[in-house]
Amino acid sequence: MKLFAVLLKMKDSELSQKYRPDHLAFLEKHHQDNNVTAYGKFTDGAGGLIIYRAETLEQAEDLVKEDPYIKTGARTYEIHEWAMVSEQWS
């Protein structure tokens, strides 16, 4: 499996607020299904970041397009395959 970093950029703050519960439910479901490894919002209100797990860019993008934020036009997205480097901290 590959990892994909998805930046969800704020497009419409009212729509984002309205669809936030649906968006969070979507993320939790995909987290439980092992399609999402991490997610969170940016503290400056610019949007958020989601790390998806998928075989291909196309599979990841299909998942992103099902996010209520994207379906309703509340956010735009930018997607990049991500090569995570895990480092142990002492």
Image (tube, rainbow, N blue to C red):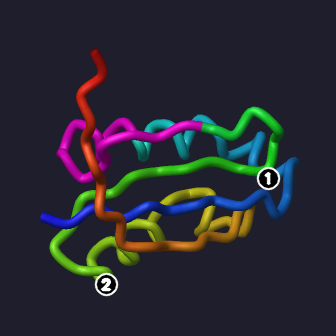
Contact, CB < 8 Å: mark 1 with mark 2?
no
- Inspect the image, locate mark 1, and give the three-letter code of the amino acid beneath it: Leu
Q: Residue tagged by mark 2?
A: 58
What residue is shown at x 24% (from left), y 53% (from top)?
35
- Left or right: residue 19 compared with residue 86: right
Task: Give the Cα distance between marks 1 and 2.
Answer: 26 Å
Q: Determine the residue positioned at 54% across, 45% down.
A: 23
User: Residue 15's spot in the image, x, y percent?
Assistant: 79, 53
Residue 21 falls inside the magenta stretch: no
Task: Judge from the rendering whether residue 90 lies leftward or rightward of residue 81; answer left or right.
Answer: left
Q: Nearer the viewer, residue 87 or 44?
A: 87
Identity of the residue drawn at 31% across and 84% down: 58
Q: Is residue 54 above or below residue 38?
A: below
> Given the current orientation, which residue lies at the most extreme front position?
90
Disc 2 secondary structure class: helix
> Residue 85, position in %: x, y?
28, 50
Pick the quarter of the image with the C terminus: top left
Nearer to us of marks 1 and 2 is 2
Q: Nearer the viewer, residue 39 or 27?
A: 39
- The kind of residue tagged 2 is Glu
Q: Nearer the viewer, residue 7 or 63?
A: 7
The residue that disc 1 covers is: 15
Q: Position of residue 63 (x, y in %)?
A: 36, 67
Q: Which region shows up in magenta?
A: 28-40
**Rendered image quadrant of residue 33:** top left
Q: Quadrant of residue 9?
A: bottom right
Residue at 36%, 72% in the rendered image: 81
